[in-house]
Structures are given as structure tokens and as C-alpha cells.
Amino acid sequence: MSPYLPSSPHRLITFVTHPQLADCIEKSAAVFRSARRVVALTGAGVSTRSGIPDFRSRDSGLWKKYDPMTVASLASFRYHPKDFFKWVRPLVKTMIDAEPNPAHTAFAKLEQAGFLHGIITQNIDDLHRKAGSKRIYEIHGHLREATCTSCYQKRNAKSLIEAFARTGALPYCDLCGSLLKPDIILFGEQLPTIIVSEAQALIDDADLIVVAGSSMEVMPAASMPIPALNAGAKLIIINNEPTYLDIRADFVIRDDVADVLPMILQEVLREPKETKRLVSNQ
């Protein structure tokens, strides 16, 4: 199968052959430059080049002893927290050591140059922030903070998470002594309502959505682009595997986002500096 799928019948642009990549990059960049408000929606595929595995893939080492869908559930954390921490420790160590890859850097530079209004990410690895991106909506949470399972005190978790990764010492509340839960969203757990609402409002106002490194199988992220698309927004998908939104896209690039996005960035920045479109953060 070609890495460049035909667009939806109502779209004007179709890319079906590998040699057309350069043309695809050029025209994708033109869409970036002409868009009023660009929003990125990113998934695990953005971070695999940084060494962080996609735990939904069964060839990932995270599947060897445990089913993440079970051990990483809220119910499992409540009743078998040691199993959760044993499973998640290698992943946490990897995330702490990971560095942003060219995809993260390209997103940050697009934002700095005024061509990206914000990032909605399903990742918990903090790599967008490390790369320099400012407007990030982490709808699946992050490891920077943790909440007590008894008194619900929220605290900075950086030192505790680093100690856990290094020694395996579980994080406990300094007020009541109960176990702390990292502020990441587990299966069966409600997503952060305010963050999700703000992210939806952001993407609803987009006239260009860039889906990068996401299979678009997990709600609510999977449905977030729909209102904007129905209102006429354009869509670029950069992902190694098919998504259900491919037929709605103006461009579908089946390739590693860490390779493709820097090429789009380079082409976008060819525009003369004096005509650069500045993006409002309001």
C-alpha cells in the first residue's frame, strides 16, 4: 500500500505515490501558511523516536508480563498498586531519560514562528514541554505532579518520581502517609474535565488540524477534530498506520512524523519573514 493515501472525494488533492513526497510537503506547508489557526493533535508515534514505546502495540516490551489494559487501570491501581508500579517503572525511567526528537522540536519551532496555535497531546512524557512548546493540553495527564489517594493533597512529584525510577521506592504522602498516584490518566479513570474542555474549544476554532503519531482510536481524542472538520477545517495526518479519519484528510502521509514534520517546517519557514502570519494566543 502506498504511504500517501487518496484524499476524501470532496477534497482537491490526492497523493498516491512515494515520489510525490516533496510535492506533498510543499503543499502541506502552503496550507500551514494560509491557515488562520493551526492545532496539532499528537499521540505515541511522536515519541517513539525518543525511545518511548507505544504500549498499545503488542510488540512493545510492556506487554511481556502484563496486559497494560488491565494493570494500568484505575481498579488495578486501587487494589494492586504494587503491580502497577512494577509495570510502570521501566516506562518512567525511559521517560525521565528521554530527549525530544525532531518532531517535538519542529512543533516547538512552528509555534515560535507563529504557525501553530497549540498542541493537544495524548502523551504523558513531557517531551513537547522539554522541546520548548508552550501551549500544551495534556489530556491524559503527566508525571510532574501526584495526588494522595487518601487526603487528596496534590504535590510536585519530580523528586519522588525520579527516586522511584532510580530505586523503586514507592511515593507516599508527606501529610498522611498514604500512597501517591501520579497525575496520569489510567484506564477507567475520568479525564481532566477542564483540560479536555479547553482542548476541545481550541480545536473547534481551528481551520487546520495536524494529527501526528496517533491511531485515533482512543476517546475523546478520536472525536475531537470532528466539529472543526464539519465546519470546513483542513486536515493533515502524519502516521505510520491508517486512521479512521484518513478519508476526511487533505493529506495523509504514512511515515514517521520525526522525519516528515521537520521537512514541513523547513518549507513553511521559506516564506519571507516580513509576511509571516503571527498567531494570537487569545
Image (cartoon, rainbow, N blue to C red):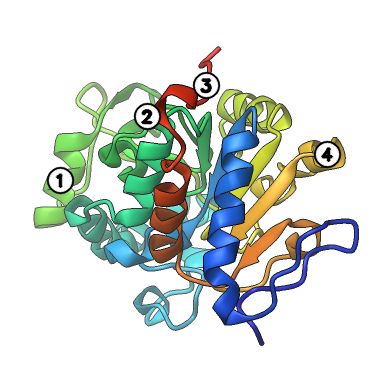
Q: Where is residue 76 in the image (x, y as percent from the top left)?
A: 48, 57
* Tag 1 residue: 162
Quadrant in the rendering for residue 132: top left
Q: Which of marks 3 and 4 is nearer the N terminus?
A: 4
Residue located farthest toward the right when viewing the structure as drawn: 10
Which residue is label 3 attached to?
279
Q: Mark 4 sits on what residue? A: 232
Q: Which amino acid does label 3 sit on?
A: Val
Mark 2 sits on what residue? 112
Q: What residue type is labelled 2?
A: Gln
Query: Gap between marks 3 and 4, in whole Å?
Result: 20 Å
Give the residue type that dot 4 points to: Gly
Q: Residues within 10 Å of mark 3 (few under 14, many from 20)?
A: some
Q: Which of marks 4 and 2 is nearer the N terminus?
A: 2
Q: Secondary structure under badge 4?
A: loop
Dot 4 or dot 1, earlier in sequence: 1
